[in-house]
């Protein structure tokens, strides 16, 4: 549950986190609606959404994905 909490909530007094935080919440809510019991999710379901979030280009990262920033390598998103 720690991973979910870190994704859903910004740190207190860290206003610079709100924009990215709200964007990430929107991505999560496209998959799982509000008031859904997140504790019932399987590890595979969480992993799929984590992969979606980490492979989505972000404006704040200059069009790069979080995965590209973390690994330092470019990924092809063309299927």
Image (cartoon, rainbow, N blue to C red):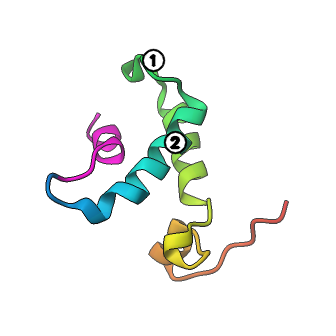
- In the picture, the disc for residue 36 is 1
Q: Is residue 57 above or below residue 12?
A: below
Tell me the CA gap for discs 1 and 2.
14 Å
Magenta-span inclusion, residue 34: no
- In the picture, the disc for residue 3 is none
Instruction: Please tell me which residue lies in front, 16 or 78.
Output: 16
Q: Secondary structure at mark 2?
A: helix
Residue pointed to by mark 2: 26
Query: Residue at position x 75%, y 71% from top?
Result: 76
Who comes first in sequence, dot 1 or dot 2?
A: 2
Query: Residue at position x 59%, y 75% from top?
Result: 64
Specify few, some or many for label 2: CA neighbours under 10 Å numbering under 14, 14-19, or 20 or more. Answer: some
* Residue 44: x %, y % from top left: 54, 34
The majority secondary structure of the magenta stretch comes to: helix
Residue farthest toward the right in the current orientation of the protein: 79
Q: In the rendered image, which quarter is residue 16 located in?
A: bottom left
* Residue 72: x %, y % from top left: 51, 82
Q: In the rendered image, which quarter is residue 3 located in?
A: top left
Give the quadrant of the C terminus: bottom right
Number of numbered tags placed on the structure image: 2
Q: Which residues are magenta?
A: 1-11
Instruction: Please tell me which residue lies in front, 73 or 6.
Output: 6
Query: Residue at position x 52%, y 42% from top?
Result: 26
Instruction: Please tell me which residue lies in front, 33 or 47.
Output: 33
* Residue 75: x %, y % from top left: 68, 73
Closer to us: mark 1 or mark 2? 2
Give the quadrant of the N terminus: top left
Q: Secondary structure at mark 1?
A: loop
Query: Residue at position x 48%, y 26% from top?
Result: 42
Q: Is residue 67 above or below residue 1?
A: below
Q: Are marks 1 and 2 in contact (CB under 8 Å)?
A: no
């Amino acid at each position: 549950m720690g991973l979910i909490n870190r994704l859903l909530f910004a740190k207190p007094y860290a206003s610079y986190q709100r924009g990215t935080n709200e964007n990430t919440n929107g991505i999560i809510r496209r998959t799982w609606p509000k008031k859904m019991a997140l504790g019932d999710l399987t590890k595979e379901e969480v992993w799929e959404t984590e992969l979606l979030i980490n492979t989505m280009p972000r404006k704040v990262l200059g069009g790069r994905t979080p995965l590209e920033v973390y690994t330092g390598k470019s990924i092809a998103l063309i299927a």
